[in-house]
Amino acid sequence: MISINCPTCGKRPLSEFHYGEILSVPDTITDDEAIDLDRAFMYNNTEGVKYEAWFHAYGCRRWVRLHRDTRTDEVIDIDSV
Amino acid sequence: MNEFVEAKVDFKWQEPKKTYDVIIIGGGGHGLAAAYFLATRHGITDVAVLERKYIGGGNSGRNTTVIRANYGIPESVRFYKRSVDLYFQLEEETDRWIMHKQKGLVWLAHSEAHVRQEKARAELNTALGAETSYVTPSEIKEICPQIDITGSGQWPVLGGSYHPAGSTARHDRVNWALAEGAMKRGAHIHQRTEVQDLIIENNQIKGVVTNHGKMYANKVLCAVGGHVTSIGDMAGLRLPIRTHPLQAYVTNHYAQSFGPIISSTSLYFYISQTARGEILLGAEIDKQPSYSYRSGYHFLQTCSFRAMTMFPFLRDLRINRQWGGVCDMSADYSPIMSKTEIDGFYITSGWGTWGFKAIPASGESMAALIATDETPDLIAPFSLDRFKRDRTMADRGSAGTH
Ligand SMILES: Cc1cc2nc3c(=O)[nH]c(=O)nc-3n(C[C@H](O)[C@H](O)[C@H](O)COP(=O)(O)OP(=O)(O)OC[C@H]3O[C@@H](n4cnc5c(N)ncnc54)[C@H](O)[C@@H]3O)c2cc1C
Ligand SMILES: [Zn+2]
């Protein structure tokens, strides 16, 4: 279970937050059409450590940035954006 | 030992070889079925299934085993209908008791919009041979006497669709029957063998690198469930897949009395009773992508709350066990069964929360694709390049939970 320690509100249940993906197309994709295709449908789906955004919808209503290991759900780092 | 543990499955374990005709990555239902159908339908038995843990240890041994054909788009109904039919004959074909049981499945509609949706589902599916009929609240009450048709006064049932072919089967037994069938015809299965890299030369697959060294084959199938992106990365393939956990739980054992499978379109939970007598409950995926197999209290609480709204008798039951799997959710909520840009490298993926029912038809189709290098008509709409061609198979409404 992911535990989010909001910089504004402190430790709050996950159900108060909305998940948000930080989208990024890899640099290796340069063709315009391929970039569009990637933006529309493809995911990095990182199996390991990644950055992501969560919106504290039922709290301070601010975005926080999480650095999470998707294999264990361990939160490595958190900051406000 | 009891009737749920098969003591006599005849696994013929072999020493690994250096070279095979076909290597299959992943010993879940889909990988094992591909090996089974390669052997039984095409006489191709120089095959190795490489499984990093134990066969059926992934989603194929963690699911809630709902088998049905009533999907939302014609291409899917046709495909799943084939799979439902193959399941009906799988016991006779493999000579193994997979505990296949026809139960009938109801989707509950709690709003006018969902009533229209379920009427449309019934029409479409019946037209395509997957019999489904629209049912009224009193007919639903007859099919399932335990339901509170008023939804505790909060979620009244306005109607629903009934799919008599809806079934379940014991998941482990399906995996074992297919594994045994493939192995006794000569296929190898190597457990604790993890694929760590792919060998690709001049855009042609040549083999795989494992924790036990290299193995060579000119045809390789990727069937690794939620872990597909890691294999995709090795091949340089971008995939329209996100991996989300899905959880389920069972209560203690009770007398057999709950006949059908019931799902709610608005409350996103579904319920059935297992052969052991447990009440089995599931719902939607966790909202954040994750590869963690841990299950949590939040899911138990929300799913139970919703289920009790429709089935007040659940209040008195005890929860025995919960677990989770990690699901390969595709961008359009339909599967991917396909060749890839790399010659000889095939993929079966995007099975998300709905792929147990598809195991026989996917195995049959992928075996045909691998054996002939020609895509069978049944799975042509599900090729990976559909996203590039802007021909997505959007069917979120049917595939959301099971
Ligand atoms: C809780 C839950 C409920 C579900 N309910 C239903 C349902 O009611 N009806 C339905 O139709 N579907 C259901 N599903 C979905 C269904 O379980 C899956 O879609 C299906 O089992 C996928 O089978 P698979 O063979 O593709 O994947 P898996 O069974 O996950 O097998 C993949 C295998 O690949 C192995 N592997 C991974 N990486 C590597 C590697 N690098 N090298 C070697 N091996 C590797 C894994 O260890 C695993 O054993 C449910 C899923 C879950 C989690
Ligand atoms: Zn906050």
Image (spheres, coloured by chain):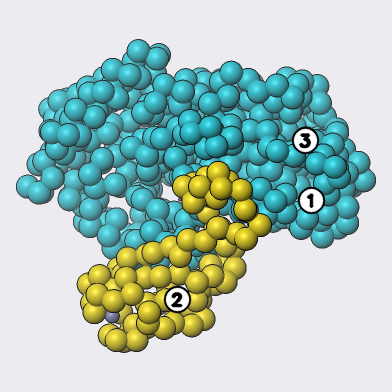
Residue B362 location (% of width, % of height): 59, 30
Secondary element at tag 2: strand
Q: In the visual, does A45 lie left or right of B113?
A: right
Q: Chain of mark 3?
A: B
Q: Which residue is mark 3?
A: B343
State the separation of the CA atoms marked 1 and 3: 13 Å
Colour representing chain B: cyan
Residue B310 location (% of width, % of height): 19, 46
Q: Evaluate whether residue B54 shows in this view.
A: no
Q: Which residue is mark 2?
A: A66
Q: Is disc 1 in the same subunit as disc 3?
A: yes
Report crowding for label 1: few under 14, some 14 to 19, many 20 or more residues within 10 A (C-alpha).
many
Residue closest to the eye, B392 or B134: B392
Q: Examine the rendered structure and indicate whether residue A5 appears above or below residue B386.
A: below
Q: Examine the rendered structure and indicate whether residue B195 appears above or below residue B105.
A: below
Q: Chain of mark 1?
A: B
Query: Residue visible at 70% across and 38% down?
Result: B341
In the picture, the disc for residue B362 is none
- Which quadrant is home to the C terminus of chain B? top left
